[in-house]
Image (cartoon, rainbow, N blue to C red):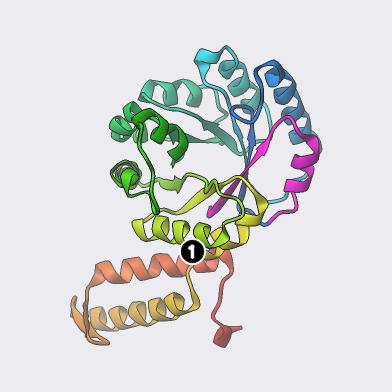
Amino acid sequence: MRSLLFVPGVSEKMILKARDVEADALILDLEDAVSLDRKIEARQNVMRLLSELDFGAKPVFVRVNRFDTGFGEEDAKAVANSKAYGAVLPKVERPEEVVAVSSLLADHQRLIAMIESPRGVLNCPAIAEASSKLNGLMFGSADFSTATRARLTEGEPELLVARSRMLYSARAVGIDAYDAPFFSIPDLNGLRRDSERARNLGYDGRAIIHPSHIAIVNETFAPSETEITNARKIVAAMNDALARGLAAIQFEGQLIEPLHARAAQRILDVAEKLQIFPESEK
């Protein structure tokens, strides 16, 4: 998943519109996007729409409230009895919180844990290993920077350590890593730069708070035609080398080994899943 669009769970109109957007996944929000006095209404609205609407092949998550709010446990139980792909748990700080929600979800459902505090970042390795239902980790830059009192500048280098620790924790157990939304909605150039930074760091995609961001995020986190073409060459060259008993060869002026072929094959796998083909192959 490259783009995960947050949609307020209390708004039927916005959820109906979200079915037709090109985001890879939807997150129907019962947490920050819903005021305290409308939490139960939002849960009922989301569950009703999940039962009535056809979202096609698009994964639909529900962001539940934390258990300590008094709403989270019932949110998770409702998700377990719905057609939702899974849940998103906000402000995760301990592995026990992941275990508690995972135990309520159906066997086929998945969970994304949001890392939004210093304690959450420090406990990332244990959180990432807490449940086999964990699909990925998602960074929450707004809450994190507030908690650390950071003064963010262009590119947010102040958050690099936190982003990296979360990414490494996800990679260590083979799950995905998603970056926070880009909050300046009109600044599409800034969105592209910020998304490229996240992708270069190793992130798989990011959360989105406005449909106008979907196209740029999808493009940025997808393999380019040049990357796909080059990956095919690397895989072919490595296969030929291995057939000749060689595990390291020079390819276009660079040394390549099986690890480079594995990285190239992942690019090809993602491209195939997204149905992205170079113009020469169409």
Relative to 155, 69 lies left or right: right
Residue 274 figure quarter:
bottom right
Q: Nearer the viewer, residue 158 or 128?
A: 158
Up/down of 45 relative to 168, above or below: above
Is residue 17 on the magenta stretch?
yes
- Residue 11 location in percent, x, y? 76, 34
Residue 117 in magenta stretch = no
Q: Quadrant of residue 60?
A: top right
State which region is magenta: 1-21
Residue 238 x/y as whole percent = 28, 79
Counting from the top left corner in percent of width and height, residue 194 is at 45, 56
Q: Is residue 134 visible?
A: no
- Circle 1 packing at 10 Å, graded few (<14), some (14-19), many (20+), is some
Residue in the picture at 47% in, 57% down? 195
Q: Is residue 226 visible?
A: yes
Residue at point 76%, 27% (across, down): 45
Query: From the viewer's perspective, is 186 left or right of 115?
Result: right
Q: Residue at x 53, y 63 (%)?
A: 189
Measured as percent of width and height from the top left, residue 255 is found at 20, 79
Q: How many marks?
A: 1
Question: Quick one: 256 or 226, which is closer to the camera?
Answer: 226
Q: Specify the amino acid type for callout 1.
A: Val
At x 61%, y 56%, the residue is 214
Q: Nearer the viewer, residue 1 or 159?
A: 159
From the viewer's perspective, is residue 229 above or below residue 168?
A: below
| Quadrant occupied by the C terminus | bottom right
Say whether residue 54 is left or right of residue 126.
right
User: Judging from the image, what secondary structure is the residue with disc 1 in?
Assistant: helix
Circle 1 is placed at which residue position?
Answer: 270
